[in-house]
Amino acid sequence: MAVYTDITEDDLSRFLTAYDAGTLLSYKGIAEGVENSNFLLHTTQGAFILTLYEKRVDRNDLPFFLGLMHHLAENGLSCPLPLPRNDGALLGELSGRPAAMISFLEGMWLRKPAAKHCREVGRALATMHVAGEGFEITRENALSVGAWRPLWEKSVDRVDEVEKGLRDEIADELAALEANWPEGLPSGVIHADLFPDNVFFLGDELSGLIDFYFACNDLLAYDVAICLNAWCFEKDGSFNLTKGMALLEGYESVRPLSDEEAAALPLLSRGSALRFFLTRLYDWLMTPPGALVVKKDPLEYLRKLRFHRQVRNPAEYGLSR
Ligand SMILES: Nc1ncnc2c1ncn2[C@@H]1O[C@H](COP(=O)(O)OP(=O)(O)O)[C@@H](O)[C@H]1O
Ligand SMILES: N[C@@H](CCOP(=O)(O)O)C(=O)O
């Protein structure tokens, strides 16, 4: 679920008077997503998404996220746009939360993406990396290698509840990644959560990217590694080389990877797998029973991590060079 904060029709109608968005016809909460409360609104001017930013989102980061969507859209990426209020501000307040009106993006996310969709995702990711150049606000990645140990320490005492023996395996992995994390690779604005539920398609055509609320400045190739993890594994845990090849071809058709970036892919993919393992593990162990949120399986990312650990060459992801 992703409606943590309720709104009333009266409050919403009043909120809308600050925008040139027409008058309210209907609204409903959107069940998907985990971070914020989202509502689909219909007004006399069309459909909009209303987002109420919840506790895990730092209010100070909102100008980065909202400004980034503007910047990316102006530079050729298809993504939703925050709607300015009549006073020019992108943020308002509703039910005690910072709130924004976001343009509605047509399309739906794919439950079973095929290689051709992975190619489109690779192309869109590279388009985003290029479009992000020149964006003046910066945001450090709050979930990069330096954040993994503190996160791990919150779960370590209970990790064996998830799988016996994990305590030593993850401790060794974390130490290896901290010691060898690459430096000096090209960096810029990354999406950092470009999973299938954040990419919309109309038929086979990619219609746009959403959910920029983990976006930050980090290594561009790390974003590629996140996508390899999120898009190129099958339900049985196997890596699909055809999908990997398509995603990387799509990416390189817009922004070729340097030799150094290519060589770092196995390590970056391990890091990305550990990052999602750790956040899922924390949520798995700490979410109170009965909470209205769908918990994601940390073991899916443990299996991916084990796969990457035995990769010796980026060609094993489908990189042709
Ligand atoms: N601009 C948009 N256009 C259409 N649907 C959207 C848009 N933004 C969000 N949604 C819908 O809301 C859901 C949750 O949004 P998301 O940004 O992923 O939430 P969260 O940040 O809580 O994870 C999406 O899966 C999608 O169905
Ligand atoms: N993609 C992450 C969780 C973040 O969820 P989102 O709904 O904000 O995309 C994961 O799969 O662990």
Image: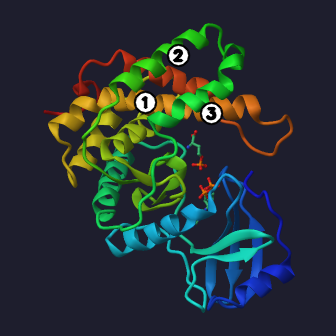
| Residue 65 percent location from the top left of the image | 51, 64
Residue at 35% over, 42% down: 224
**How far apart in space, not on screen, are marks 3 and 2 (Cα)?**
16 Å
In the rendering, which numbered label is found on residue 271?
1
| Residue 249 percent location from the top left of the image | 24, 44
Numbered disc in front, either 2 or 1: 2
Mark 1 residue element: helix
Circle 3 is placed at which residue position? Answer: 280
**How far apart in space, not on screen, are marks 2 and 1 (Cα)?**
13 Å
Q: 310 above or below 287?
A: above
| Residue 29 percent location from the top left of the image | 76, 64
Q: Quick check: which quadrant has ligand 1?
A: bottom right
Task: Name the quadrant containing residue 164.
Answer: top right
Ligand 2 is within 8 Å of the C-beta of the residue at disc 2: no
**How far apart in space, not on screen, are marks 3 and 1 (Cα)?**
14 Å
Ligand 2 is within 8 Å of the C-beta of the residue at disc 3: yes
